[in-house]
Image: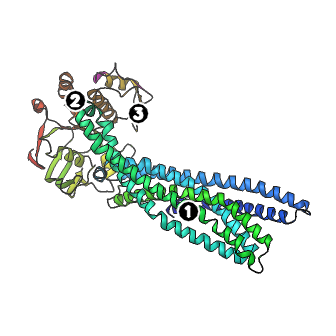
Amino acid sequence: MKLIRLLLKNSGKSFFIATIFSILSGASGAGIIAVINYAIANLENSPIWLIWLFVSLCIGLWIFRFISWVLINRLAQGVIYDLRLEMTQRILNCPLQHLESLGIPKILATLTDDITAISTASIQLSVIIVNIAVLIGIFVYFLWLSPLLFFIVFICLILGFYLYQFLQKPGIEGLQKARQIQDVMFGHIRAVTEGVKELKLHRHRRIAFFKEDLEISASKYKKYRISSITVFAFAGSLATVLFFIPVGLILFAFPKVNGISTEIVSSYVLAILYLINPVSEVVTSLPQIAQGNVALNKIESLGISLSKQVIEPNFPTGSAFESNWTSLELVDITHTYVGNSEEHQFTLNNINLKFEPGELVFIVGGNGSGKSTLIKLITGLYVPNKGNILFDNRPITNENREWYRQQFSVVFYDFYLFERLLGIEENSATEIQNYLIQLELERKVTVKDGILSTTNLSQGQRKRLALLTAYLENRPIFVFDEWASDQDPVFKEIFYHKLLPELKQRGKTVIVVSHDDRYFDKCDRIIKLDYGSVVEN
């Protein structure tokens, strides 16, 4: 079972200790049944030591079961913790273009629902392990009482197990289909949160989205879940009923067999009835285990997809800024961007560009000309299919790409604004306040202990906060992807006439993606793209 392998892989020693205590718990339970049977057979002359043995076994059962339960639960939570961090780290290390092809809904579903399903399954696994230990203890007692009856009960249990495995297959298939449709449903839910304004403003669009998208995916998810739960309920209830077959055989058939005494029969029946609760708990836990395995398979499929790409080394870089660099070159770069399907792809062809310290360069072109793709290539977020990026005549490879990225302070068009100034060396409060004044945000935002007082601002003001972060990073190369598109006319003037020239005077290389042709005279040169090719430089 994949869950057990996951537990063993991450914490084999702890799992072994927890299993030992589970076995001791099962042995204590079997011992209690044996003592009860012995006491029933000797009601008139039960020795005093039997009472103390019974009490000792009860205390042992309580202690061992408690310890095993706590250890296995702690182990399961540790696995979930490690898995969540590992998945997040793998996503952060995965090439950006591959993440974009996976899509946000699929990644979110994996990081939320799949991890939750594995967490639930791991806890249920602790229930199963403890109860299986009880089953093993009772079966050892069965073997001691009568090897023949033990064989019969064991065969019935094995047949019941395989019958359950056969019956649950449609249920597992239903869970897998539900998990597949869940990715689609996550996309629709995301559309609700991000497109709420558009949906509110257009009644027919809202109705069509609800009826034709969200309702259909939610209905399919419900159908698959109900069908799978129905299958598990049928298989589980049948397995519980089948557990009484050995009781019937022992009561009505085997008393007629020579060598099987009434005492042995009553001992067997009592022990089997004792097992009904552990077996019921195991059967009830199996659907959650199946759901956990489906989630693990989904994560594995994501992991396999990730492994097809080059996983980027995450080397610690410290303050590895190259302040005395002399050139950044793109040499014979060709790169194909593939969208959600092979039909939607775009290629940058034969790109040869050079940037030097202190340059102010504008990248221009129509929509879909390749500006954003070029920016991601320049900053090292995309790995070119062909050609080389040279930084100070040093080729950028997988070994130094992480270091290379640290040379850029970037504000993307679809930027994300963190609420804290993460990973930025301490700056004086005076310096931060001066930047806020320069960005005309001193009345809107304060910064205390690296925490922004608010990010609930207009898009233009949020972009200014992102620019504040770039200022504080103070890296050699600044990149702005259509930064001014959300600014009012007054601050757009400030950006082009004051902020950009100041960065240039500080020796920074500034690369600006822009559509503002009225300010094209402010740059040193213009790089114009048209359908993936540089047509002017």
Let me know if residue 32 appears in the view: yes
Name, please, the residue furthest toward the left. Answer: 535
User: Can you give x and y, in whole percent of width and height, for residue 51 in the image?
Assistant: 86, 58
Which residue is labeled 1 in the image? 238
Callouts 1 and 2 close, C-beta under 8 Å: no
Q: Amino acid at mark 3?
A: Arg
Q: Earlier in the sequence, mark 3 or mark 2?
A: 3
Let me know if residue 406 appears in the view: no
Which residue is labeled 3 in the image? 420
Tag of residue 524: none
Q: How far, Cα to Cα, is label 1 from label 2? A: 64 Å
- Circle 2 packing at 10 Å, graded few (<14), some (14-19), many (20+), is some
Secondary structure found at label 3: loop
Which residue is labeled 2 in the image? 486
Q: Is residue 80 left or right of residue 198?
A: right
User: Residue 387's quadrant in the figure?
Assistant: bottom left
Eyeballing the image, is 236 above or below 444?
A: below
In this rendering, which labeled residue sits more in front, label 3 or label 2? Answer: 2
- Residue at 78% from the left image edge and 58% from the top image edge: 57
User: Can you give x and y, in whole percent of width and height, for residue 14 in the image?
Assistant: 61, 58
Q: Is residue 142 left or right of residue 492?
A: right
Q: Is residue 471 left or right of residue 316?
A: left
- Circle 3 packing at 10 Å, graded few (<14), some (14-19), many (20+), is some
Q: Nearer the viewer, residue 48 or 453?
A: 48
